[in-house]
Amino acid sequence: MLLVRGHGGGTALTGTIFERGEQAPTYRGAPNEDAPYVWVCDEFYEVESGGSETEIDGRTIRVAFDTPLPRGFDTREQALSAAKEHVRTQFARVGVPADDVRVEVVRPEEEGTPEDEQPAPADRSADEGSPEGDASDASR
C-alpha cells in the first residue's frame, strides 16, 4: 500500500494505491479486482453553498466531496502517475496551481517516522520519495 499525499494552500489530500496482492476496497464503482494496482482518492471542488468550510491559501471556501474515484492500473508507474495528477487536479479545482502542490509518496509503516529512521535514499526512488518497484513489476 502506498499513500499519495498532496500538500498545497495550507492543507493536504491523501489517497491510497493498493498494490499487487493487497485487498483493494470493494464497493459499487470499484475497479476490476484483477487490476494489480488500484488508486482510490476523494474528489472535491469549490461550491457557493453547502459543503464543508475549509481554509485554502488564507481564504475560507466551501468544498463538496464526490464519491472516491477508484481506478485500476497494470503497473505501479501508471498508478503513481495518475495518482499524482489526480491530487494536483483536486487542488487546482480550489485555486491552488498544480506547480504549487508538493506530492509525497509513503508507505503507511513510514507514516510519522522521523526522516533519519526512514529507508536510506538508495532504497527509495528519487521521484518525490516514491518507493521503488518490486522485482515482480515487469514494467521496471
Image (tube, helix red, strand yellow):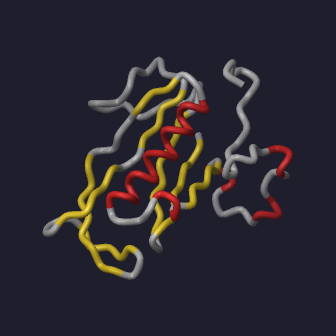
Task: Give the position of the N terminus as an image quadrant.
Answer: top right
Q: Is residue 17 above or below residue 28?
A: below
Residue drawn at point x = 38 percent, y = 73 percent: 56
Point out residue 104 in the picture as x, y percentages from the top left corner.
61, 55
Q: Is residue 65 left or right of residue 70?
A: left
Which corner quadrant of the image does residue 90 belong to? bottom left
Point out residue 21 in the picture as x, y percentages from the top left corner.
59, 25
Residue drawn at point x = 15 percent, y = 67 percent: 50
Residue drawn at point x = 47 percent, y = 45 percent: 85
Which corner quadrant of the image does residue 68 belong to? top left
Q: How many marks?
A: 0
Which corner quadrant of the image does residue 63 belong to? bottom left
Q: Is residue 138 above or below residue 3?
A: above
Q: Is residue 103 left or right of residue 52?
A: right
Residue drawn at point x = 64 percent, y = 47 percent: 107
Point out residue 61 in the picture as x, y percentages from the top left corner.
27, 73
Kindly give the residue lying farthest to the bottom in the view shown: 58
Task: Give the position of the C terminus as an image quadrant.
Answer: top right
Relative to the observer, which residue lies in front, 29 or 61? 61
Q: Is residue 130 left or right of residue 33?
A: right
